[in-house]
Image (cartoon, coloured by chain):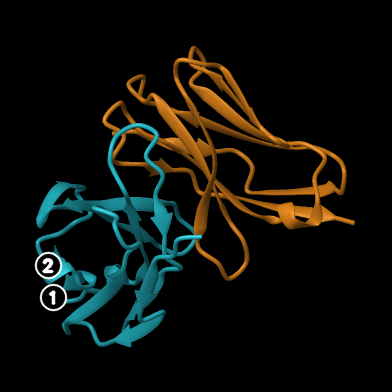
Amino acid sequence: GEKVEQHESTLSVREGDSAVINCTYTDTASSYFPWYKQEAGKSLHFVIDIRSNVDRKQSQRLIVLLDKKAKRFSLHITATQPEDSAIYFCAATDSAGNKLTFGIGTRVLVRP
Amino acid sequence: GPKVLQIPSHQIIDMGQMVTLNCDPVSNHLYFYWYKQILGQQMEFLVNFYNGKVMEKSKLFKDQFSVERPDGSYFTLKIQPTALEDSAVYFCASSPHRGLGNTLYFGEGSRLIVV
């Protein structure tokens, strides 16, 4: 089955800098890659996604990149702000899209 | 935004006993999911559920596990009997539809400790 590896367990960045979280996956059939964010004491919520028919997507300060050849995708949080501090989870699923495989999560800390 | 509520938030139970974890999904959502996260490990898919039936389940969804949503009430995960390895945080999620681009809405999790 699919395996998703999330390479950074923690990231500490200065406010205003960028944070980059990298994930790799194993199943070439995976075609949808969402990212979820979990703030302290709250549930996971969706932040951004990318499908395999594109290699870049941006939503405000978030950019996701997808390299299908390398089976790698990444989340770039630009111009970080304190409210970006959270655990971020990458995930992958196949074309049916109903069974997400998650990474272990990356704790991002934005320092003032 | 839409919220998924999970009850209880945590429970300690003796091995061999039964436990029911309750999930109140987002109203008008039709698809429901359970994920399991053992401490320090990844959150893993257990099962998804639609129209009264299990659609898919993983190998983690043992015979001792069952799910149901009687009459549009709570979506429940029942474990009977519990084992030590069932200790984990169980996350419920719901979505309005299925397929690609399908956003899941998660609850805050139910922490189960089996002693």
Q: Which residue is mark 2?
A: B64
Amino acid marked by disc 1: Gln
Left or right: B28 in relation to B78: right
Going from the N terminus, do you reach mark 1 or mark 2 first? 2
| Residue A74 point in image, percent of width and height | 61, 30
Which residue is at a point 48% across and 21% down the rendered structure image? Answer: A71
Work out which residue is located at the far right of the displayed protein and give it: A112
Find the residue positioned furthest to the top.
A69
Alpha carbon distance from label 1 to label 2 = 5 Å
Marking on residue A99:
none
Tell me the kind of residue under disc 2. Gln
Q: Nearer the viewer, residue B65 or A84?
A: A84
Name the image quarter holding the C terminus of chain B: bottom left
Q: Residue at x 50, y 57 (%)?
A: A44
Residue at horizontal 45%, vertical 61%? B2
Q: Percent from the top left, x then y, of residue A83?
A: 74, 57
Can you say whether A56 is above or below B27 in the image? above
Quarter assignment of residue A55: top right
Q: Colour of chain B?
A: cyan
Image colour for chain A is: orange
Q: Which mark is residue B80?
A: 1
Q: In what element is the residue under mark 1?
A: loop
Q: In the displayed structure, does residue B103 sit left or right of residue B64? A: right
- Is residue A4 something that shows in the picture? yes
